[in-house]
Image (spheres, rainbow, N blue to C red):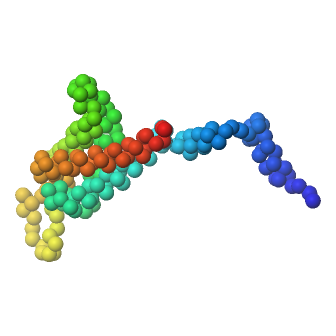
Amino acid sequence: MTISTFEMIVATTLQLGIDGDPPFRGSDAEVDKVRVHATLGFMDGATGLLIKLGVRFVVFGAVFFIAARRNPKVIIPVKWATPVVALTFALLNTTLYWALRPVLELATLGALGFAMPLVVNIVLLYATVKLFAWEKLPRFVAKSKHGDQKKPEPGDAKPLFTIDGIFTTMWMALILTAAHGVLWFALDYIPNA
């Protein structure tokens, strides 16, 4: 029985390792630790930031979609605006959250550290609503469900995203904070554990 060159290369590589050193032989815990760090290595740098932004976009999109369907005071007048709102909040959450939290903790001298994610998400939600209420952004008239073709009045145009009332804003911020906590656990805590 002859051994091909390919089989010899594979056997040598398996015995010596790719760089010529003997392969890593450690305890099962060390092997598992190396394997976990090798598989979660992509969560660093720009790739990790884009993965976290994408996951936040999907999760916050689901939160905004469900909230707008369940609560009549969370108003997204056109269907295609939900991903736009979710992407805006995800961008704010990913970029500004880590900058805003230490500033607010310093301002309160750490007294509200346990409630700081809720406070930051209230600020970010308020910023998102104000961004879409900005006068220079285009307004949209939602089509009626009955299909009648009346001309839109100047007062019919609405921003892409509004929340009516302080309690609805608090309710929405609480749901977004719960989603943010799940995302923090899944994307930040587990990969670093």
The spot of residue 9 in percent (x, y) is 81, 48
Dividing the picture into quarters, in which one does residue 157 lie?
Answer: bottom left
- Is residue 5 visible to us here? yes
- Is residue 132 visible to us here? no
**Relative side of 153 to 56, left or right:** left
Q: Nearer the viewer, residue 108 or 87?
A: 108
**Relative side of 156 to 98, left or right:** left
Could you tell me which residue is drawn at 14 percent across and 75 percent down?
146
Image quarter (top left, top right, bottom left or bottom right) of the N terminus: bottom right
144 is higher (above) or lower (below) than 16: below
Q: Nearer the viewer, residue 5 or 121?
A: 121
Outermost residue toward the right in this view = 1
The spot of residue 139 in percent (x, y) is 16, 55
Could you tell me which residue is drawn at 26 percent across and 59 percent down?
66
172 is higher (above) or lower (below) than 79: above
The spot of residue 25 in percent (x, y) is 71, 38
Could you tell me which residue is drawn at 63 percent across and 38 percent down?
30
**Relative side of 58 to 169, left or right:** right
Could you tell me which residue is drawn at 37 percent across and 46 percent down?
183
